[in-house]
Amino acid sequence: MRLLFIHAEDFSYQVREKAVENPEPLTPELERGSARNALVVFTTIEDSDSNDPNYVSYVVDQILDVLNKVKASQIVLYPYAHLSPNLARPSVALDILLAIYNKLREKSPVPVMRAPFGYYKSFSIKCYGHPLSELSKTLSPSMVQQQAVQQQAASRDYYVILTPNGEEYEATKYPFKPGEDDLKVLVEKEVMKRELEGGREPRYLDYCRKFGFEWEPMSDVGHMRYGPAATLMMELVEDYAWKLANELGIPVFKIRGTNMFRRGERAIDEHARLFNERMYTIEGDKDELIMRYAACFQQFAMIKDWVLSYRDIPVGMLEVADSYRYEQPGETVLCFRLRRFYMPDLHIFTRDLKNAMEVALRLHELIFREIRKLGRDYVSLYNVTKQFYEEHRDYLVELAKREGKPILVRVMPEQKYYWVLNVEFHIIDELRRPREIATFQFDVGNAQRFGIKYMGENGEVRYPVIIHTAILGSVERYIYALFDTAAIMESRGEVPRLPTWISPIQVRIIPIGKDHLRFADEVASRLEERIIRVDIDDRFEETLAKRIRDAETYWVPYIVVIGDREVKTGRLSVRVRGAGKIVEMGVDELINRIEEEIKGYPRRPLTMPKYLSKRPSGILS
């Protein structure tokens, strides 16, 4: 924002004609105006400005600071689009100007008038000419952030460690015990602010590329593309996230919506400003639009139109939302930190904080159950307000007890956000770095902001407490956790692998010669009937050794080689990944073994041709 201050002995203006297509409506009191001993504030709204109340208050304070110095008896707010080449859209500029005008009228000790927005105007001005009669300022939202940082210095967050038996320690003085290395890593990063770099490229990146998770070089930084195998894995995780949501024992609705929302909507703007520098913005036909940070906007905009009573609560809503975060170029990491990613975003609308805490116990159990299925575990960072910590410390101890180990708690003396509790569940990766995967938080602000309400038992209007959660984390981060787990396996000398349910190819059949293809097809059909993903390597121009090696390269859990003996006996020779030997079994035995491994997980068919001879070279998985 650019401000030019003129302390004027006399000032007057007259509207002449429209300057923009849709100026604000003209009223008689706006059409012309005059003032004496006035501080005239020529104001240019730039594209980086916002109507965030904190920013508006900051601008008003700057104007009043000049007013106090020049001792004017009136303020004139005058829209002036000639101080900057980077102008905000007219609709946005008007909203910000009106916000400044209203706040000025509220706080100013002298009368405030304004000239209308969107018109060419003639004006005359007589400047006093004293040393302070001509001043200028350049303001930006970042100045408010800097101011907030300075204010925070007087009221800093602090960290404690809570043990399952309720002991509390300053995080920096905690006596770490054997087996608490992961917690120590988390404390070093979050409390000591030590950047724990691994010193080499993590191994999981090779696995990402192997399965078709890549950067898209023809797009913006941080945007990925997903090959056939990667697409299948993404869809399976999305399906699984929906299944897990329905295990919470509450009604859950799956929805779908838009990924862009109009600036100027109060609820949208107030929520979005929390992530202001991370928001993607685009130009619409008439308004500036923001790309959603998560599924919150769409779900909140939808459920506010539902008629809910206390009998309907708690209720959940899930969308696999393509989400957009303007991460810095140096921060983006394949499959982990992206500018566009997919989030199975679940919101649970609960009656009150007590109900939210009850529901979260089941949620907490699911989150830990799923990561432990991978042979991993979380170390937890609980971000809480001081009031929540003082009133519900026993609840945090109970969660630590359920985790079976100490938790790190960050206590915030002031409520800076819309939540009172925000939990980050971290794995410690192959390079010994904390990596947040799953999360949940208790939101006490957005229901009222978006107009989400329900009728209480006595007919009163109530606003729910909202749990935000991603049980598995984002789709890409969950897959990252799978690959990182495989990297740790490999570092231990084990054969890296994926769980069978999410392996793109679960069974590969390799007929030795063309005479064996018919039986290979019959076996494949039996597997396909049970929605087991199977393909056939019919590249007879390649050696058997190469075809087996290719299947192993792509981590196929079960490799079936078919020759004369198999055709004659109906018994299969199966290479089981990680077993180190060939196992003989019948088709039914193979089916039963696989079905036991994928029990409780979603199933999807292949996302590529069944016959490898029909695929381009290199697309083997």
Image (tube, helix red, strand yellow):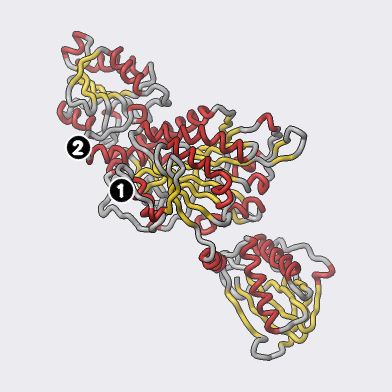
Which residue is rendered at x = 16% and y = 26% of the image? 544
**Which quadrant would residue 428 be assigned to in this image?**
top left
| Badge 2 density bin: few <14, some 14–19, many ≥20, Cα 10 Å | few
Residue shown at 21% from the left, 23% from the top: 575
Quadrant into which the C terminus falls: top left
Residue 562: percent from left, percent from top: 20, 18
Residue 568 lies, with reference to residue 149, above or below; the image says above
Real-space Cα distance between discs 1 and 2? 18 Å
- Position of 147 with respect to 121 (left or right) is left
Which of discs 1 and 2 lies nearer the camera? The answer is 1
In the rendered structure, the answer to whether residue 339 lies left or right of residue 285 reads left
- Give coordinates of residue 22: x percent, y percent: 71, 61
Residues at badges 1 and 2 in contact (C-beta under 8 Å)?
no
Identify which amino acid the numbered label 2 is placed on. Answer: Gly
Which part of the image, by quadrant, shows the N terminus? bottom right
Q: Secondary structure at mark 1?
A: loop
The residue indicated by pointer 1 is 432
Mark 1 is on which residue type? Arg
Write down the residue under mark 2.
493
Q: Nearer the viewer, residue 475 or 451?
A: 451
Q: Which residue is at the front of the view, 50 or 217?
A: 50
